[in-house]
């Protein structure tokens, strides 16, 4: 009888071992599968994050290019309008000296002033502070010249000494326009040094 109990105990241990081994194997397989899924999920998350970073970098680059294009267009418009405003003032100065075509030159200066004012207003919304400071200085000088010319027209015939003083002011305006253009070119990355 003892042999029967021993055989039964051996059989029970064998069955328990077989069932335990199957359970242990299944448990390890489940754990391995969970680890694989966690690893796969982590890789997918990293891939999504990387794709999002690339997409954001492309969006930022596109915005930067659009901003540069917008600034370049604004700079061209403002530079052109400022130079034409200055040229119209000089033309009016010469017309006042000779006494010919004053009305036509005055009309042209008024038109150029309006275009300059509009382009300067646009620049105030777009350009960075350094460029705006240079544009503001040039604009103030041009408007001073405008005021001087309007006073000279009001007191025709024009005083030649006042016209000579205005001619000296035009040199200041040209220098400020040159400085404005230089700061614009620096902002666009066209220049990298002193004017």
Image: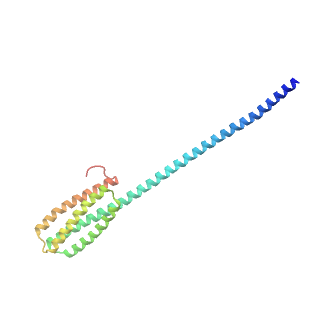
x, y percent for residue 68: 38, 57
Residue 101 is left or right of residue 21, and the answer is: left
Image coordinates for residue 93, horizontal then vertical, percent: 17, 69
Asked if one can make out residue 101 in the rendered structure from this viewpoint, the answer is no
**Residue toward you, 141 or 1:** 1
Number of numbered labels in the structure image = 0
- Quarter of the picture holding the N terminus: top right
Q: Which coloring applies here?
A: rainbow
Residue at the extreme bottom of the image, as rendered = 103
Q: Quadrant of residue 183?
A: bottom left
Q: Residue at x 21, y 68 (%)?
A: 146
Q: Residue furthest right?
A: 1
Residue at (24%, 60%) from the top-left corner? Answer: 137
Q: Nearer the viewer, residue 49 or 21?
A: 21
Residue 139 screen position, x and y as percent: 25, 63
Residue 119, picture quadrant = bottom left
Q: Is residue 29 above or below residue 184?
A: above
Q: Is residue 189 above or below residue 90?
A: above
183 horizontally vs 163: left or right: right
Q: Examine the rendering and report whether any part of residue 59 can be seen.
A: yes
**What residue is shown at x 68% (from left), y 40% (from top)?**
30
User: Could you tell me residue 17's position as x and y percent?
Assistant: 76, 31
Q: Quadrant of residue 20?
A: top right
Residue at 51% from the left image edge and 51% from the top image edge: 52
């Amino acid at each position: 009888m003892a042999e029967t109990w021993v055989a039964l105990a051996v059989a029970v241990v064998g069955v328990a071992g077989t069932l335990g081994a199957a359970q242990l194997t299944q448990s390890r397989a489940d754990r391995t599968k969970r680890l694989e899924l966690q690893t796969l999920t982590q890789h997918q998350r990293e891939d999504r994050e990387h794709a999002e970073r690339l997409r954001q970098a492309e969006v930022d680059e596109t915005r930067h290019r659009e901003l540069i294009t917008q600034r370049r267009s604004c700079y061209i418009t403002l530079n052109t309008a400022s130079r034409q405003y200055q040229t119209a003032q000089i033309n009016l100065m010469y017309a006042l000296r000779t006494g010919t075509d004053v009305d036509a030159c005055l009309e042209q200066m008024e038109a150029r002033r309006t275009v300059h004012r509009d382009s300067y207003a646009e620049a105030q919304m777009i350009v960075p502070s350094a460029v705006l400071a240079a544009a503001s200085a040039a604009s103030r000088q041009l408007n001073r010249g405008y005021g001087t010319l309007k006073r000279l027209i009001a007191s025709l015939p024009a005083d030649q000494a006042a016209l000579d003083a205005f001619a000296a002011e035009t040199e200041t305006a040209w220098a400020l326009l040159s400085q404005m253009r230089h700061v614009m070119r620096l902002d666009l990355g066209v220049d990298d040094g002193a004017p």
